[in-house]
């Protein structure tokens, strides 16, 4: 009889343990676990992509600043060279630029304007643009408006 009771108790406990497991699987099926794992994996991928995006945005901003700096350095070098030629021999410079005077520093002015509107180094671009416009004003005061035959050359 004791053996029967022990067997019955073991059987009952096994049945209740089986019911608890089945109740858990009823409320948390195996598919839910896989969906949660997939959600966790996707969240990790999203976090990694956001970190990469942040790093890429920082790289883009750094390159944008380097490009702006390089453009400003090139324009400044050209302006300084032009100013040195102006101080050295203004008449020769005037004769050499007369045909292209209307287009003088045109691309540089456009670049400086773009940098002033969008760029990271607005003050430096504005100072360079002021120098360019001052040079153009000085040249326009020195360049005769009419050529040797009396016709307008500009």
Image (cartoon, rainbow, N blue to C red):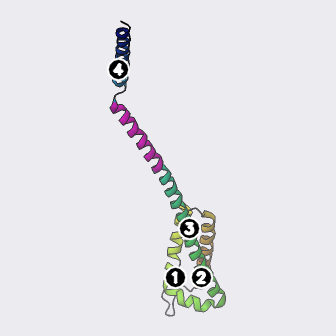
Residue 5 pos. (x, y %)? 37, 8
Residue 68 pos. (x, y %)? 55, 68
Q: Distance between the residues labelled 3 and 4?
A: 68 Å
Residue 141, located in which quarter of the rendered image? bottom right
50 relative to 114, above or below: above
State the mark number for residue 70. none
Residue at 59% across, 71% down: 129
Name the mark nearer the viewer: 3 or 4: 4
Q: Give the residues in magenta.
A: 30-48
Labels 1 and 4 touching (C-beta < 8 A): no
| Residue beneath disc 2 | 139
| Residue beneath disc 3 | 66
| Residue beneath disc 4 | 18
Q: Between disc 3 and disc 1, whose residue precedes? A: 3
Q: Distance between the residues labelled 3 and 2?
A: 32 Å
Q: How crowded is mark 2: few (under 14 residues within 10 Å), some or many (20 or more)?
A: some
């Amino acid at each position: 009889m004791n053996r029967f009771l022990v067997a019955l108790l073991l059987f009952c406990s096994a049945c209740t343990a089986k019911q608890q497991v089945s109740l858990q699987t009823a409320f948390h099926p195996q598919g839910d676990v896989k969906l949660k794992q997939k959600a966790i994996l996707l969240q990790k991928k999203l976090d990694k992509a956001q970190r990469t995006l942040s790093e890429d945005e920082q790289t883009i901003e750094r390159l944008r600043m380097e490009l702006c700096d390089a453009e400003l350095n090139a324009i400044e070098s050209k302006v300084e060279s032009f100013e040195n030629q102006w101080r050295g021999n203004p008449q020769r410079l005037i004769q050499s630029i007369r045909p292209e005077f209307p287009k003088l520093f045109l691309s540089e002015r456009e670049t400086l304007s773009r940098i002033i509107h969008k760029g990271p180094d607005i003050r430096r671009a504005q100072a360079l643009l002021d120098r360019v416009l001052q040079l153009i004003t000085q040249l326009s005061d020195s360049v005769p408006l009419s050529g040797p035959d009396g016709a307008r050359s500009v």
